[in-house]
């Protein structure tokens, strides 16, 4: 059985699926779920897969969904998984793709091995790594389940029940170009940027709020006063209002620093998603905790500052929680997952299915 799960996982990561190029992986998963589980599959207009697996040995029990994202970050082409000392890793030039194929492989194995199950829906989203776009565009009319889990976390005993509001702050500073020998004729957009960034707090602002300036680009030539700088910044907070206030503070800092030097800053704030929290006593959190216990671990509920498909789906009215994949070192060529952890995830999910089937 363990070999089958490892093989399942390795077969998945061997199919390239960097964000934007997931179609072949989604197609292949669809074929596999149809053949192996008798699933009825649909691919929505955005390219997300929704596979409906009929109930087995269960009368009642509400339908439940399991979601994982089908895309990976780069470098994710030509992944060659190797199993060594009970750990699966890539040969070294690529990521492994445990994020999130460990989640998907464990889901499929759990559905296959569960002795009884309610109607189960397996959702494979696209473009999670490039802004949760698959989940945003997921055609919910194709989904019967109202609750489910996203298997895309880390630790196996953690149930992630909430996440932050996330604001992107895009800045364009327009100064005035001039020859470096005649600085009085110009206004340096770079100096304005430097001044503005010192006017707001960055990093960890409090236990639930962070802010970051991620990119800065500007200037054309060494001997010219730079006329234009663009900046990509962001902030997040588990408290929605705090996130908005921080984003506004960053906007004001750029505008005021520019105005003080007779220049202009165009600042755009975009709310990527809003903070949400699934109640501890909701059915999905309770089921997830019971499943983790059944697998011999101590469940812990958590809120995180990262974004997952869960935030989008929860914002769209579904009851969701995130479970771990056991993967480590995601988004790096050191990414790995142990065979034991992969098996444990699958066991947790199998318990979740069987407990749900019991009603
Ligand atoms: Zn992921």
Image (cartoon, rainbow, N blue to C red):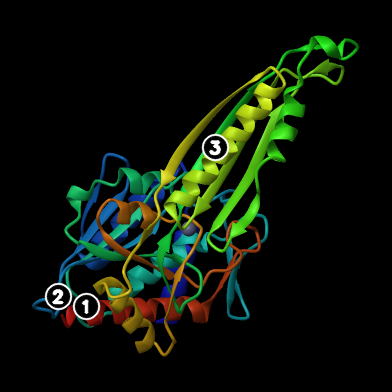
Q: Nearer the viewer, residue 306 or 113?
A: 306
Q: Position of residue 138 (x, y in %)?
A: 29, 47
Does dot 1 land on a helix, a strand or a loop? helix
Q: Position of residue 301 (x, y in %)?
A: 42, 75
Mark 1 crowd level (few <14, some 14–19, many ≥20, 10 Å Cα): many
Q: CA distance from mark 3 to mark 1?
A: 42 Å
Residue receiving disc 1: 356
> Which quadrant is the C terminus positioned in?
bottom left
- For the residues labelled 1 and 2, say whether their Cβ atoms are less than 8 Å apart: yes
Q: Residue at x 50, y 57 (%)?
A: 306
The answer to which quarter of the image holds residue 286 is bottom left
Side of 264 relative to 222 (left or right) = left
Q: Which mark identifies residue 169?
A: 3
In this picture, is 140 found above or below 3? above
Q: Position of residue 189 (x, y in %)?
A: 72, 23
Q: Residue at x 37, y 87 (%)?
A: 293
Q: CA distance from mark 1 to mark 2?
A: 6 Å
Q: Which mark identifies residue 61?
A: 2
Q: Which mark identifies residue 251?
A: none
Please report whichever mark, 1 or 2, sits nearer to the chain's N-terminal start. 2
Does dot 2 land on a helix, a strand or a loop? loop
Side of 43 relative to 264 (left or right) = left
Side of 74 relative to 34 (left or right) = right
> Which quadrant is the N terminus positioned in?
bottom left
Q: Is residue 17 visible?
A: no
Mark 3 crowd level (few <14, some 14–19, many ≥20, 10 Å Cα): many
The answer to which quarter of the image holds residue 278 is bottom left
Side of 223 relative to 281 (left or right) = right
């Amino acid at each position: 059985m363990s070999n089958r799960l490892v093989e399942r996982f390795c077969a998945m990561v061997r199919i390239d699926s960097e964000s934007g190029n997931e179609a072949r992986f989604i197609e292949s998963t669809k074929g596999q779920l149809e053949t192996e589980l008798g699933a009825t599959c649909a691919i929505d207009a955005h390219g997300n897969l929704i596979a409906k697996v009929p109930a087995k040995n269960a009368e009642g029990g509400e339908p439940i969904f399991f979601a994982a994202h089908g895309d990976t970050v780069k470098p994710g082409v030509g992944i060659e998984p190797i199993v060594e000392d009970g750990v699966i890793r890539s040969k070294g030039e690529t990521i492994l793709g445990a994020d999130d194929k460990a989640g998907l492989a464990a889901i499929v194995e759990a559905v296959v091995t569960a002795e009884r199950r309610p109607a189960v829906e397996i959702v494979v989203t696209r473009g999670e790594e490039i802004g949760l776009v698959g989940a945003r565009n997921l055609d919910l009319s194709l989904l019967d389940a109202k609750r489910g889990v996203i298997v895309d976390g880390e630790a196996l005993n953690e149930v992630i029940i909430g996440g932050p509001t996330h604001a992107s702050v895009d800045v364009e500073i327009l100064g005035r170009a001039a020859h470096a020998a005649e600085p009085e004729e110009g206004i340096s957009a770079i100096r304005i940027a430097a001044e503005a960034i010192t006017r707001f707090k960055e990093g960890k602002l409090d236990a639930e709020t962070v802010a970051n300036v991620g990119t800065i680009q500007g200037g054309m030539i060494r001997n010219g006063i730079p006329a234009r700088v663009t900046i990509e910044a962001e902030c997040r907070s588990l408290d929605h209002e705090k996130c908005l206030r921080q984003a506004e503070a960053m906007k004001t800092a750029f505008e005021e620093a520019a105005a003080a030097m007779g220049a202009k800053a165009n600042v755009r704030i975009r709310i990527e998603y809003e903070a949400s929290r699934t109640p501890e006593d909701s059915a999905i959190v309770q089921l997830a905790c019971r499943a983790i216990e059944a697998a011999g671990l101590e469940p812990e509920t958590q809120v995180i500052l990262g974004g997952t498909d869960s935030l989008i789906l929860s914002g769209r009215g579904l009851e969701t929680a995130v479970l771990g994949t056991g993967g480590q070192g995601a988004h790096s060529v050191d990414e790995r997952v142990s065979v034991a952890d992969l098996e444990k995830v699958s066991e947790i999910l199998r318990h979740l299915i069987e407990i749900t089937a019991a009603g």
